[in-house]
Image (spheres, rainbow, N blue to C red):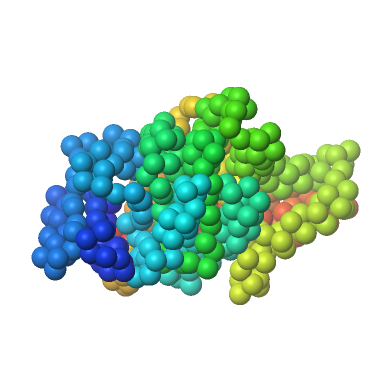
């Protein structure tokens, strides 16, 4: 936890209500909060559950070294952990159902080759705004396709960092938690996979959690999720290639499919193709993209990605435009990770709003606070604005002089970049 005022009671309560013999379960709350008031509230909540007979430990650190990985690493050092065989991990906004352990631990007990059991995420605020609906579409594909395929075909997939149960011996054999990147969960999963441990994904077991509903929080999260894997790929590609315990096919899957295509090339190709090459064909007639490359193949891929969330199929156009906008941010983060420059190890905790969002968004914002120049300037993302203006220019040129008839797409995509560039997406939370 880190200053989780809005959600700490829900997550602690859910963990303490897990169905398991009381003498064989230990709840550990790792609190890195810097706000003394919130720290006191979390500690009091732990004491309240302890008074009910729950075996719960409240652990804090003197610093935030290593962020989440550092907290998890310190948490595993306590003597009482040595009595445990498995560790279930939940981020602060996750609320497991009472039968979570009953549906995950048996996999580990009955098959000593399994090191990790991962559950699926269920989004409690997916209907909050258009931003959360589009996140749901992307993440549903990740869980329904990527995780499912990795589990069934290779017994390997990236640990999602939460809503999973690790065999502690597997965790220790892999080298424990490392803070060398911002994706400590993926780092551990890859190292454990190279040691020969198998993973199981349980798609019908869902754990409630919250999607970031402000654009600021979502951008920070996507920077971490794009920069971290690229940085980890750079640091581990040699180790994967030289590994002796796994097959050549699994190494190829890890290097090419898991990392290179999905974590690096996908972001770069999306941005360059849709936001650079397509507009350029309007300005430079010699550059031509065949219809199958411009329409048929991208449309097929998009439709396949969208089948994971059939209820949101009517939002497909918005989702395409939004994903193209975010490809700029993700591409930039990918290069930061590959070349280890700038904010390569930046970790900004994703803001959770919980039920507090209703109170915050209902607050009346004075006209004075609406038009502060400093706040407006900080909200503008100039790279997105620049790309948006460029696309609008290309659209106007194609409409006036061109023959490609790409101007409809270019105008829509340009407006999407401008909307995101000026921050008009997601939930607005006034400063309290």
Residue 432: in sight, yes or no? no
Of residues 205 and 426, the one nearer the viewer is 205
Of residues 77 and 110, the one nearer the viewer is 110
Judge left or right: residue 280 versus residue 74.
right
Judge left or right: residue 294 versus residue 166.
right
Question: Residue 407 in the image: x percent, y percent?
Answer: 77, 56
Q: Residue at x 22, y 61 (%)?
A: 23
47 vs 77: above or below? below
Question: Residue 229 in the image: x percent, y percent?
Answer: 53, 38
Q: Residue at x 20, y 41 (%)?
A: 79
159 vs 173: above or below? below
Question: Residue 417 in the image: x percent, y percent?
Answer: 59, 52
Of residues 405 and 80, the one nearer the viewer is 80
129 vs 63: above or below? below
Question: Residue 291 in the image: x percent, y percent?
Answer: 87, 53
Q: Residue at x 60, y 24 (%)?
A: 242
Residue 68 location, quadrant: top left
């Amino acid at each position: 936890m880190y200053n989780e005022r809005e959600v700490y009671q829900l997550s602690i309560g859910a963990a303490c209500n897990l169905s398991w013999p009381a003498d064989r379960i230990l709840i550990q709350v790792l609190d890195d909060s810097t706000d003394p008031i919130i720290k006191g509230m979390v500690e009091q909540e732990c004491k309240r559950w302890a008074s009910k007979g729950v075996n719960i430990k409240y652990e804090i650190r003197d610093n935030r070294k290593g962020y989440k990985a550092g907290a998890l690493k310190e948490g595993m050092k306590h003597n009482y952990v040595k009595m445990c065989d498995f560790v279930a991990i939940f981020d602060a906004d996750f609320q497991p159902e009472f039968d979570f352990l009953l549906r995950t631990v048996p996999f580990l007990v009955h098959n000593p080759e399994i090191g990790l059991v991962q559950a699926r995420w269920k989004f409690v605020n997916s209907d909050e705004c258009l931003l959360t609906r589009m996140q749901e579409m992307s993440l549903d594909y990740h869980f329904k396709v990527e995780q499912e395929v990795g589990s069934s075909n290779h017994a390997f997939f990236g640990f999602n960092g939460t809503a999973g149960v690790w065999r502690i011996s597997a965790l220790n054999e892999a080298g424990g938690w490392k803070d060398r990147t911002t994706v400590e969960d993926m780092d551990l999963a890859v190292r454990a996979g190279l040691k020969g441990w198998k993973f199981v994904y349980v798609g019908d077991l869902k754990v409630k959690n919250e999607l970031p509903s402000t654009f600021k929080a979502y951008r920070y999260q996507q920077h971490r999720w794009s920069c971290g894997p690229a940085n980890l790929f750079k640091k581990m590609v040699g180790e994967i290639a030289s590994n002796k315990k796994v097959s050549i096919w699994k190494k190829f899957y890890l290097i090419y499919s898991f990392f290179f295509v999905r974590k690096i090339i996908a972001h770069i190709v999306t941005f360059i193709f849709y936001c650079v090459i397509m507009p350029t064909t309007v300005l430079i007639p010699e550059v031509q993209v065949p219809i199958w490359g411009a329409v048929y193949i991208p449309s097929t891929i998009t439709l396949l990605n969208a089948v994971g969330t059939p209820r949101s199929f009517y939002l497909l156009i918005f989702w395409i435009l939004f994903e193209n906008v975010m490809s700029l941010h993700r591409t930039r983060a990918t290069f930061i990770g590959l070349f280890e420059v700038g904010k390569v190890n930046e970790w900004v905790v994703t803001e959770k709003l919980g039920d507090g969002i209703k109170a915050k968004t209902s607050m009346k914002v004075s006209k004075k606070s609406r038009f502060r120049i400093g706040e407006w300037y900080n909200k503008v993302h100039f790279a997105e604005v620049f790309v948006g203006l460029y696309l609008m220019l290309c659209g106007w040129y194609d409409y006036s002089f061109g023959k490609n008839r790409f101007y409809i797409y270019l105008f829509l995509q340009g407006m999407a970049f401008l909307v995101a560039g000026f921050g008009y997406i997601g939930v607005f939370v006034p400063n309290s």
